Amino acid sequence: MDKAYEGDETRQLVFDLGMEPVVPPKKNRLSVWEYDRELYKKRNEVERLFRRLKGFRRIFSRFDKLDVIFTFFIHFALIVDTLFSVNRP
């Protein structure tokens, strides 16, 4: 859930499903709410990790038939991402 989906109906649906929406309100919203900023930052980190993993076409396309091979390539991609993240701020 992101700012584009922060409407009252969507928020109520998330609450009805037993989840907690972690999204900031839009700036022009009249009734604002509190949200966990640290959890929102962590959610963003996870989304950026999935975006980087999609760069590995083999993982994104799921060419491998065996789960063991697929898991290996996920681990490989995470290792490569960690090695190259040393230079990232």
Image: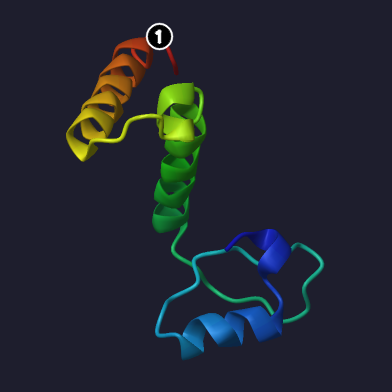
Decide if residue 25 is on the left or right side of residue 53: right
Q: Position of residue 77 (x, y in %)?
A: 33, 22
Q: How many labels were placed on the picture?
A: 1
- Of all residues, the one furthest to the left in this rendering is 68
Q: Is residue 56 visible?
A: no
**Looking at the rendering, which quadrant does residue 39 occupy?**
bottom left
Compared with 35, 70 (above or below) is above
Decide if residue 5 is on the left or right side of residue 68: right
Q: Residues within 10 Å of mark 1 (few under 14, many from 20)?
A: few
- Of all residues, the one furthest to the front in this rendering is 65
User: What residue would you read off at disc 1?
Assistant: 87
Q: Quadrant of the N terminus?
A: bottom right
Compared with 80, 52 (above or below) is below
Task: Give SS at disc 1.
Answer: loop
Q: Position of residue 29 (x, y in %)?
A: 77, 73
**Looking at the rendering, which quadrant does residue 11 occupy?**
bottom right
Q: Quadrant of the C terminus?
A: top left
Residue at image coords 40%, 85%:
18
Compared with 53, 89 (above or below) is above
Q: Position of residue 64 (x, y in %)?
A: 33, 30
Q: Is residue 76 visible?
A: yes
**Nearest to the observer: residue 20 or residue 26:** 20
Decide if residue 42 is on the left or right side of residue 13: left
Q: Position of residue 40 (x, y in %)?
A: 47, 55
**Looking at the rendering, which quadrant does residue 63 occupy?**
top left
The colour style of the image is rainbow
Residue at image coords 57%, 85%:
13
The amino acid pointed to by label 1 is Asn
- Of all residues, the one furthest to the bottom in this rendering is 16
Residue at image coords 17%, 34%:
68
